[in-house]
Structures are given as C-alpha cells and as structure tokens.
Amino acid sequence: MAAVFVLWTADSDRAVTDNALMQTYKRLPVAFERGAGAWLYDSSERAYLDALAGIAVCVLGHSHPAVTRAITAQAGRLIHTSNIYEIPAQTRLAERLCAVSGLDRVFFGNSGAEANEAAIKLARLHGHHRDIEKPAIVVMEGAFHGRTLATLTSTGNRRVQAGFEPLVSGFVRCPWNDPEALEHIARNNTSVAAVLLEPIQGEGGIRIPDPGYLAEVRRICDAHGWLMMLDEIQTGNGRTGEFFACQGAGVKPDVISVAKGLGNGIPIGACIAGGAAADLFQPGNHGSTFGGNPLSCTVGLAVLDVIEQEGLPAHAAVIGQRIVSGLRDATGDLECVRDVRGAGLMIGVELDRPCGALVEAALQRGLLINVTAESVIRLLPPLILTEDEADTIVERLTAAIREFAGHTG
C-alpha cells in the first residue's frame, strides 16, 4: 500500500483545510467559538444575533441547559447500541410524537432527507397494496425535500437537480397552492398513491398557502385513496405557532416528516405515520444504523419537554408577529420591499430584486440571516427569542436593507 503524506504549510492552515474539504458550501468569512441563547460568538468574542438558528435547527438556542444536561448524562451512560435491540428512549420519544401529532407509529432516521425517504417508501408500499404497478407521488413546484436522489427528484427546483440525472421516476409535478390542478391530476392519472408537500414552503421563499388549501388537499386525498404526506421538517417543532403547521389549518395528514429542531443540533429525523400508512413497514422493509439511538432520542425528549413546558409555540406566534409588524412599519416606505410575511418564527421579507448580498451585509451588523429563492430574506430564529432580541433583528435588518436599496438603485 502506498504511503500518503499530508503537507502542512507554515503560513496557511486555512488553505490546507479548504483543499481537504469538498467544495459543497460557499462559506461566509466567520467561524463561531461558542453560543448562548440566541447569540453566537466568534474567536474574537464578537457577538452575532442568530436569526437563522442553524436553518431552523436550534429551536432552543445555543447551549440550552436542558439539552446540555441530556447530552452529558446520556453520553456518560450509553450513546449507541443498535435497532436490533430495544431502545427505551426511542419508544418514549415515539409515544410523545404520536401524542402531539395524533398519528400512530414512528420511524427514526438521522435527518429530514431520511425522514422524507421513509415517507416516499411508505407511499410506494401503499400504492403496491392498492395494486398500482408503478405508484406515483404528486409533488409541488417550488418544494424542497432534501438532497438524496429521491428527495432531490421530489424537490421542485431544477437548479439543484441539474447534473444529477437520471433522476428517480415516479413523481408528478403540480403547481403549488392550486387545488384545481391537483384535481386535474386526480382525474387523469390513476397511478398516484400519495401527495407530498410542505404546509409552508421554506426554501421556496416562505410561501404561505391560501386558507383552506391544506383542507382541500386532504379532501382530494381522501376521495382518491391517496396518502397525504406533509414535510414539516422546517415548519415543525413549534416554529409556526403550533407544534405542527398543519394543526393551525385543522388538518391531520397520514404522514408527517420532522427533523431539524427535534434534536436542537443533534442529528435526528422522524417519519410519523397514521391510518393506512401506520402499519405499512414490516421487519426488513426499512432501517437505519444510527437512527433513533439512545443519545439522539434522549435529547429529543429533552427538547420536547422544554417546548411544551415553556409554551414555545404560542411564544413563537407572538414574537413572530412582533417581528413581522416591526419590519412592515420600518420598511413600509421602501419600494424594493414587496412583502413581509410569516407564520410564527418562520418569516420572509421579499424584495423586488436578487438580494444575496444582504447575507454578508447583515453579518457585518452582527446579524445572521440567509436568502432563499434569490430575493426572499429568510428569518428562522430560536423560539426562545425575547422581545428585545426581536426588536434588534428588526433594527439591524432594516438598516441592512436600506443600505442595500441605496446601493442597488
């Protein structure tokens, strides 16, 4: 076997690191050393207000004591066994998720993409049980469901699919927020077994559907024997003002995928199923080496405890409205701001032009945001955000937008 030598340069550890990493991310010029609550601190102890929360992951903020205790205590006892044995913490977390969702059974993975992969497999099993030779799943334009091959295919964004062909077959595209288009598919396609959609499109630009849309999707699914599958990876865990966004619409789906905030940074994902979907998986149909291990499930239980005990969904609704109202008032005179919208602490500010430059402009002001769909500023702060921190977000973001508007016309 040939020897492999790594040469370290005296003047550039950064260059070596960059060369060693696959270049899948366009990183910002900052690295964080520690976090506390809604704040992150870089190596020079400069503070940044985190209005992104690891892209909706750190719902309890950084270094939350309940999460720290759960990790420390469980790591000292047992981190991993295998799903060929009983895992009591996994059973308890499944019971909690079933109770809050109204569904019946849970499969645990390590990410949102894995949760959606499980949902896709459930849909295909459901179709085969209905004697559909090649079951299809209706997915929405503008959706985002992950970066594995199946979830990449189900994503409604051609740009993230390009170069990865051939894509996975078995998906039917439908316009978002258009029940008539879904009805048209139902009348003309007998191979459909399920519909997969986000109750609010996150990566698609914080797109909130019309009132009654989810109820119409539920009605159409019931009429045709389809599974209604909701991707609540970004909207779940209390972010939109309810534990799941579909609860605000009074709709119970057959399948919910959830991840991100469930572990507050510890990787965990879950596919929750009820009704006709609950018992589709049997031994050998699906699995995960790390999914639902003692550490991740113990942390998940701690996160749910804090969300429930502190009433964080209701808090998110109040604080989110404060930010939306504040931004509307502060930017109402700016022609470049087309819309400010949100549900709880899932907020979008839509501009009339591409605004990716605002990410670094906000960073310079000590505020962490991102931009999606090219022209929508996305805010996903921790659910523990205070009123003062909400006002700081409004102040710093407004200043960045005003400067940006002046520079771009």
Image: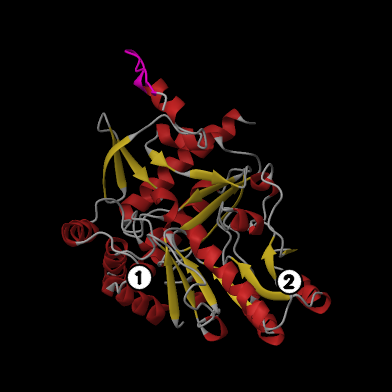
Element carrying mark 2: loop
Q: Residues within 10 Å of mark 1 (few under 14, many from 20)?
A: few
Q: Residues within 10 Å of mark 2 (few under 14, many from 20)?
A: few
Cα gap from disc 2 to disc 1, whole angstroms:
32 Å
Residue 153 coordinates in the image, percent (x, y): 66, 56
In the rendered structure, the answer to whether residue 352 lies left or right of residue 277 reads: right
Name the amino acid type tagged 1: Ile
Residue 148 - label: none
Residue 214 coordinates in the image, percent (x, y): 62, 75
The residue tagged 1 is 84
Quick check: can you spot residue 324?
Answer: yes
Quick check: can you spot residue 234?
Answer: no
Residue 328 vertical position relative to residue 138 in the rendered view, above or below:
above
Q: Image quadrant of residue 292? A: bottom left
Q: Image point 62% across, 58% down: which residue? A: 150
Residue 177 vertical position relative to residue 92 in the rendered view, above or below:
above
Query: Which numbered disc, 2 or 1, marks the residue that appears first in the sequence?
Result: 1
Over which residues does the magenta segment extend?
A: 3-13
Q: Are marks 2 and 1 in contact (CB under 8 Å)?
A: no
Element carrying mark 1: loop
The residue tagged 2 is 134
**Front one among 264 and 128:** 128
In the rendered structure, the answer to whether residue 60 lies left or right of residue 25 reads: left
Nearer the observer, disc 2 or disc 1? 1
Is 358 included in the stretch rendered in magenta? no
**Front one among 30 and 47:** 30
Residue 114 coordinates in the image, percent (x, y): 49, 60
Residue 140 coordinates in the image, percent (x, y): 68, 63
Q: Magenta stretch mostly in which secondary structure?
A: loop
Could you tell me which quadrant the N terminus lies in?
A: top left
Residue 146 vertical position relative to residue 209 in the rendered view, above or below:
above
Q: Image point 71% across, 84% down: which residue? A: 224
